[in-house]
Amino acid sequence: MFIKVELTIKDRYESAIKNNELNIELESKNICELVHNDTIYGIKAAELTKCLNNIDKAIVYIWTPNCKGESCVSVGAVEDYCFANGFDLFVVCTDYSPEAIKIQRTPKRPFFSINHLYYGSKIFGESHTSKFEKELINQESREGRLLEFHNGEYKKSFNIN
């Protein structure tokens, strides 16, 4: 008999830290000024909103490492889309997967993650991702993984293929 055990994001965070697989900082000062480095910054929606308020056009990519769905594309593909269409890109990871993160193209800004200590890390009930998104876009749900903002105002969500 096989029993599948679901790990919470907290479990995966602790494993990545314990095994020195990822550098993760959950309390950072000014995330708006950060450029890519080897640290993943755990953020709250309010912190990201402050950055988005000062940018004409931005995309927040809600990226799930190891996602296999049709709406899941590489960070590089989203970065190419943003460059071609004049958007600044913020990549927000929903999970900690060292293998998946390390093979992605390096974006201009660092990888961000949802601060699971702030939003919780339940297996059942509302997920940390749902709570983060609800706070960021002031809506219960979204259609796509790419969230478009103009001067901090949420416009729409969509996917690229």
Image (tube, helix red, strand yellow):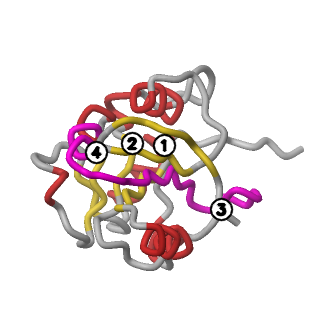
| Disc 1 versus disc 2: nearer the observer | 2
**For the residue marked with disc 3, what is the amino acid?**
Ile
Residue extent of the magenta highlight: 49-72
Q: Please identify the quarter of the rendering in which residue 119 is found.
A: top left
Disc 3 element: loop
**For the residue marked with disc 1, what is the amino acid?**
Ile
| Disc 1 versus disc 3: nearer the observer | 3
Q: Is residue 24 above or below residue 115?
A: below
Q: CA separation, marks 3 and 2?
A: 22 Å
Tags 3 and 4 touching, CB below 8 Å: no
Disc 4 element: helix
Q: CA separation, marks 4 and 2?
A: 16 Å
Q: Tell me the tag on residue 119.
A: none
According to the image, label 1 marks what residue? 9
**For the residue marked with disc 4, what is the amino acid?**
Leu
According to the image, label 2 marks what residue? 114
Q: Nearer the viewer, residue 69 or 33?
A: 33
User: Residue 57 at what x, y percent from top left?
Assistant: 36, 54
According to the image, label 4 marks what residue? 52
Q: Tell me the tag on residue 160.
A: 3
Q: CA separation, marks 1 and 2?
A: 10 Å
Q: Residue at x 43, y 40 (%)?
A: 10
Tags 1 and 2 touching, CB below 8 Å: yes
Q: Nearer the viewer, residue 4 or 146?
A: 146
**Residue 149 magenta-drawn?**
no
Q: CA separation, marks 3 and 4?
A: 21 Å
Disc 1 element: helix
Pointer 1 or 2: first along the chain: 1
Tags 1 and 3 touching, CB below 8 Å: no
Q: Is residue 87 above or below residue 53?
A: below
Disc 2 element: strand
Pointer 3 or 4: first along the chain: 4
